[in-house]
Image (spheres, rainbow, N blue to C red):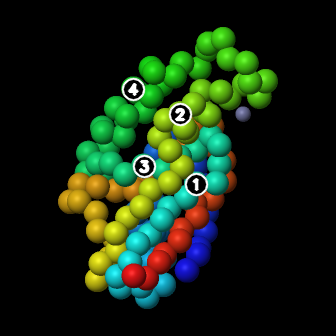
Amino acid sequence: MFATLNVKTSSQTEMVDVTGQVQQELSKSGVEEGRLTLYVPHTTAAITINEGADPAVKADILMVLNQMVPWKANYKHMEGNSPAHVKASLIGSAETVIISAGRLVLGTWQRIFFCEFDGPRNRKLHLQIASL
Ligand code: ZN
């Protein structure tokens, strides 16, 4: 089963918790045992799984990314958003989650985050849910 979620971002750089939306799509699919692939079809956004309990964690991740990839540097790309492209490649455009008993198998503190690096924008997140 294939589905696309719409993700509306509200800042230039942010991590949006999409775990609830993803679980909702999984429940609609009726798949009990299988594998869920998340795929971001953008060049300046990404997907990651990390701690959602303490919001300071995502703030720290974004702080470190911003330090690693400064906005001002000798970039060649004319569009002016090279840092966003670099961050998207560092984080990656896909994640896989195991499905068991109709639920996403995530660790206690894990959440799925859509990562915006050149917002705010209306983004898409593709899901493929495979029954195994
Ligand atoms: Zn660009």
Q: Which disc, if any, is residue 48?
A: 3
How far apart are the alpha carbons under marks 1 and 3?
Answer: 10 Å
Disc 4 marks which amino acid? Val
- The residue under label 2 is 87
Residue 117, image x and y in percent? 57, 37
The image quarter in which residue 70 lies: top right
Q: Are marks 3 and 2 in contact (CB under 8 Å)?
A: no
Instruction: Tell which quarter ligand 1 is in.
Output: top right
Q: Is residue 76 above or below residue 115?
A: above
- Of the numbered discs 3 and 2, the one sitting upstream in the chain is 3
The residues bearing labels 3 and 4 have C-alpha atoms spaced at a distance of 15 Å
For residue 11, say whether it is visible.
no
Q: What SS does tag 2 mark? A: helix
> Looking at the image, can residue 44 be seen?
yes
**Residue 6 position within the rendered picture, expressed as x and y whole percent measured from the top left:** 61, 63
Task: Name the secondary structure under disc 3.
Answer: strand
Q: Camera-side residue: 105 or 10?
A: 105
Badge nearest the viewer, 2 or 4:
2
| Total residue callouts | 4
User: In the rendering, which numbered label is found on residue 64?
Assistant: 4
Q: Quadrant of the N terminus?
A: bottom right
- Which of 64 and 1 lies nearest the eye of the viewer? 1
- Residue drawn at point x = 40 percent, y = 56 percent: 112
Extreme-left residue of the structure: 108
What is the three-letter code of the residue carrying label 3?
Thr
- The residue indicated by pointer 1 is 40
